[in-house]
Amino acid sequence: MTGADAPAAHWDLQAVVSGLHAVRSRWRDAQGRSRETGGREFPSREALARVVEELCSALFPMRLGPADLRQECEDFYVGHTLDAALHRLLEQVRLELAYQARHGGEDEDAARTRAERLVGEFAASLPDIRALLDTDVEAAFRGDPAARSVDEIVLCYPGIHAVIHHRLAHRLYQLGVPLLARIVSELAHSSTGIDIHPGARIGHSFFIDHGTGVVIGETAVIGNRVRLYQAVTLGAKRFEVGEGGGLAKGLPRHPILEDDVVVYAGATILGRIVIGAGSSIGGNVWLTHGVPAGSHLSQASLQQHAKPAAGPAP
């Protein structure tokens, strides 16, 4: 049935709206957020998704830009797209800095002024980010025998998609807008299944092969020419408790992988431990202690090492 023949709805919409209003009010009172701001208080995930899409197309215009773009128009397109993306980013940065100021007792107007300088610094870093991404793309091409071209990698590989997002998010994290950075990272997480915290420090020529299920924690440090496979976790072994009884924030708690380390599928490396340069960690290995440079660990070698020494024959 349609139109006049359809039965009347029986929900009490006004009661639902009033109930939701009451719940929001209780939450804001409990969080000390009762003061009206007159507008949106938080950055928008939707707006940032558009910003990142535009930044990606400006970084790789002939591969991630519009289908009808011609090379002779490339610089004009990049300039036009960047200008739009950076103005949109500026609005989101202003929201986060104003939010920080509001809850930190700082001057909101000064925070909004600081936003323009921050976005200027971010823009100035884009050529370096593109150069760094080129090393990641080349590492993927060298590291995957199935890759036919570097263009295929930029267009198709979820690991590169996640790393592009991470390079942008990490710069935002460094500049002091961690909420924006986290949203950018989570956009890639949602589409690729690769979870890289924007605080993680990652060197050049980084390659994540396949990638689904990879987790890299906030304080992880990854050297140059490191390769990870799917379902690898670089996580924390335990969490320190702060003075108020909650978890302490920001303490180093994730692994350090030195240069030229390879970690195969399903391996889990936990805690603030060092995996020495040139080491390889085999599939499904569970590791909570550091290893020296040049180590080659597998499940079999770890099990053999864990066996007790044989006693005298009866």
Image: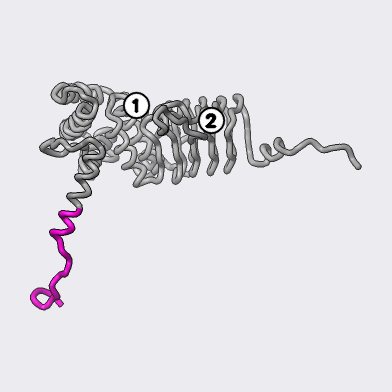
Q: Residue at x 15, y 31 (%)?
A: 87
Residue 151, image quadrant: top left
Quadrant showing the N terminus: bottom left
Residue stretch rendered in magenta on the structure? 1-19
Q: Residue at x 48, y 36 (%)?
A: 235
The residue to which callout 2 is attached is 261
Which of the two marks, 1 or 2, is nearer to us in this view? 2
**Image location of residue 11, percent across then percent down:** 17, 66
Q: Judging from the image, what secondary structure is the residue with disc 2 in?
A: loop
The tag on residue 131 is: 1
Residue count near mark 2 (Cα–Cα under 10 Å), binned few <14, some 14–19, many ≥20: many
Quadrant showing the C terminus: top right
**Image location of residue 214, percent across then percent down:** 45, 41
The Cα atoms of the two marked residues, 1 and 2, are separated by: 22 Å
Residue 276, image quadrant: top right
Q: Tell me if residue 16 is in the magenta stretch.
A: yes
Q: Is residue 247 left or right of residue 126?
A: right
The tag on residue 271 is: none
**Image location of residue 219, percent across then percent down:** 43, 29
Q: Is residue 5 left or right of residue 106?
A: left
Residue count near mark 1 (Cα–Cα under 10 Å), binned few <14, some 14–19, many ≥20: few
Residue 78 seen in the current view: no
In this rendering, the answer to whether 25 lies above or below 4 is above
Q: Residue at x 15, y 54 (%)?
A: 18
